[in-house]
Amino acid sequence: MNFNQLQQPIGTPMPDWRGASTPEPVTLNGQFCRVEPLCPTRHGNDLFEAFSADQENRLWTYMFMGPFDSQESFFDWLTPLEQSLDPLFFAIINPDTGKAVGICSYMRIVPQMGVIEVGNFLFSPALQKTPAATEAIHLLIQHAFEALGYRRCEWKCDSLNHPSRRAAERLGFSYEGLFRQAIVYNGRNRDTTWYAIIDSEWPEISSAHQAWLSPSNFNCHGQQLQRLAELYPQR
């Protein structure tokens, strides 16, 4: 415990903290996917086709945008995203086909505090519940901590979005609380659930991710041999 001259408890001193780096459009390569800067002219047709496979429009339920009733309206939304710096958008590429199958982003970026969020996950049916989906998020978090020097990576979602909550917990994020009536979107209330990973937790979480993503963890049919939850140390 640290105390000031008035004997009040205070936080750990950080005399050498100079802030984190602002993320830039970079390409992150994995074995199951590639994460690269979103380019509507290069990725738009692939993304529209991939998202259209979700004929019930389930992937849009908890998003602020969509669904789109035409390719034109989809491009009207997609095109400005290329110039956005916060959120900073990326396309998720299937390296075997070269086609874009999803979108993700950094957002709520605060370099001076070392805080960044990963979000805007739009995973097509072809990407959902695949090793590539896990790896894409791993690559974003890894880059934030190990290359850019962030201290905290956040994940937030509608409290009723149970798949997103399960994904956050599966990936090693810790539940931090419920922000009641935080947002009004799509004409309805949203209570927001907060999760985070901090830099001291990342090495063990990253090791678990990498062990799960190892080719040795999948059989000849591509089925996992160990669940990711089994690879974390006891926390």
Image (cartoon, rainbow, N blue to C red):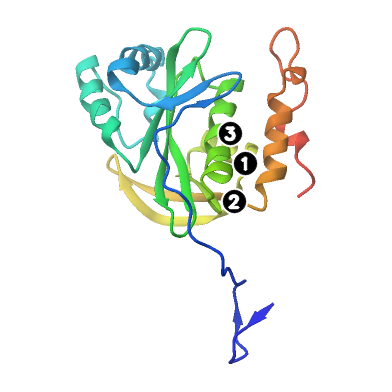
Residue in the picture at 53% in, 8% down:
96
Q: Which residue is mark 1?
A: 169
Q: Nearer the viewer, residue 62 or 170?
A: 170
Q: Which residue is mark 3?
A: 138
Quarter holding residue 107: top left
Any part of residue 176 in sight: yes
What x and y, as percent, mark residue 170?
A: 64, 37
Is label 2 in contact with label 1 (beta carbons under 8 Å)? Answer: yes
Kind of residue sitting beneath label 1 = Glu
Mark 2 vs 3, N-terminal side: 3
The residue tagged with tag 3: helix, strand or loop? helix
Which residue corresponds to the image point at 56% horizontal and 70% vertical from the top-left? 15
Image: 206 above or below 54? below
Q: Is residue 46 above or below residue 26?
A: above
- Choose the circle earlier in sequence order: 1 or 3: 3
In the rendered image, is residue 129 in sight?
Answer: no
